[in-house]
Amino acid sequence: MPTNDALAVYRRKRDFSRTTEPTGSKADRVSDEPTFVVQIHDASTLHFDFRLEVDGVLKSWAVPKGPSDDPHDKRLAMPTEDHPMEYADFEGVIAEGEYGAGTVIVWDEGTYRSLATDRHGREIPFDQALEAGHASFRLHGRKLHGAYALTRIRRGGQREAWLLVKHDDARTSHHGTPHPSRARSAHTGRTLGQVSAQERTGGKDERG
Ligand code: MN
């Protein structure tokens, strides 16, 4: 779990009678391996959010084109603020005028295993690898499988940039990434458009 302070800040910023975003009050997840989640976020620009559990929070990157299972694709990943663990389950519409306003679906979720090593091939803690600017990991998701790496290619505060790249391993399938507008939620099978339409009409889940 993150420190109480980390969650207190998240909660202070939100009125949970008004937003459907998570409160960050759930207990620890029952998993030996850390969580990952990929959300699709139809904000001012349509993008993917790639999040890895590290030390009780979700380390986050906005990935404009989304993760690819093709090792030839080098996907730009721009770091964003840490999110609470409960955000991994968030799917819905962030109200207009709010930070990140727009529709969010959970595109993929699962666990990952650190493959982080130093330059001599010795295992190192995952947070240390991220700090050093290069971390490999194996994803066990519903859609994404196999080894990926995040590599920092540019420093400089707001301009910091990373690349998310698939390792050329047995799980390579060269499918690329589906178009985000047609992609479906790993939770509910809904598209962004369906989630948005259902919240707009206040309707229940009526997919068939
Ligand atoms: Mn986002």
Image (cartoon, rainbow, N blue to C red):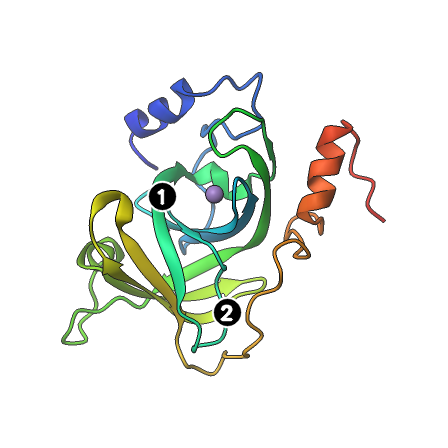
In the rendered view, would you say 58 is above or below 125?
Answer: above
Name the residue: 56% across, 23% down. 19
User: Which is more foreground, mark 2 or mark 1?
Assistant: 1
Indicate the secondary structure of the residue bearing disc 2: strand
The image quadrant that residue 163 belongs to is bottom left
Relative placement, left or right, of 107 versus 25 is right
Q: How many residues crowd mark 1 within 10 Å: few (<14), some (14–19), many (20+)?
A: some
Queried on whether the Cβ of the residue with tag 2 lies below 8 angstroms from ligand 1, the answer reads no
Relative placement, left or right, of 62 versus 46 is left
Percent coordinates x, y for residue 195 in the rendering: 70, 40
Percent coordinates x, y for residue 74 in the rendering: 40, 69
Percent coordinates x, y for residue 34 in the rendering: 40, 53
Relative placement, left or right, of 41 versus 131 is right
Please name the amino acid that badge 1 sits on.
Thr
- Which residue has dot 1 on it? 80
Which label belongs to residue 145? 2
Percent coordinates x, y for residue 190 in the rendering: 71, 48
Please name the amino acid that badge 2 sits on.
His
Q: Could you tell me how far apart the alpha carbons at marks 2 and 1 are, in whole angstroms? A: 24 Å
The image quadrant that residue 139 belongs to is bottom left
Residue that extends furthest to the right in the rendered view of this protein: 208
Q: Are marks 2 and 1 in contact (CB under 8 Å)?
A: no
Queried on whether the Cβ of the residue with tag 1 lies below 8 angstroms from ligand 1, the answer reads yes
- Earlier residue among tags 2 and 1: 1
Name the residue: 51% across, 30% down. 22
Name the residue: 17% across, 69% down. 118
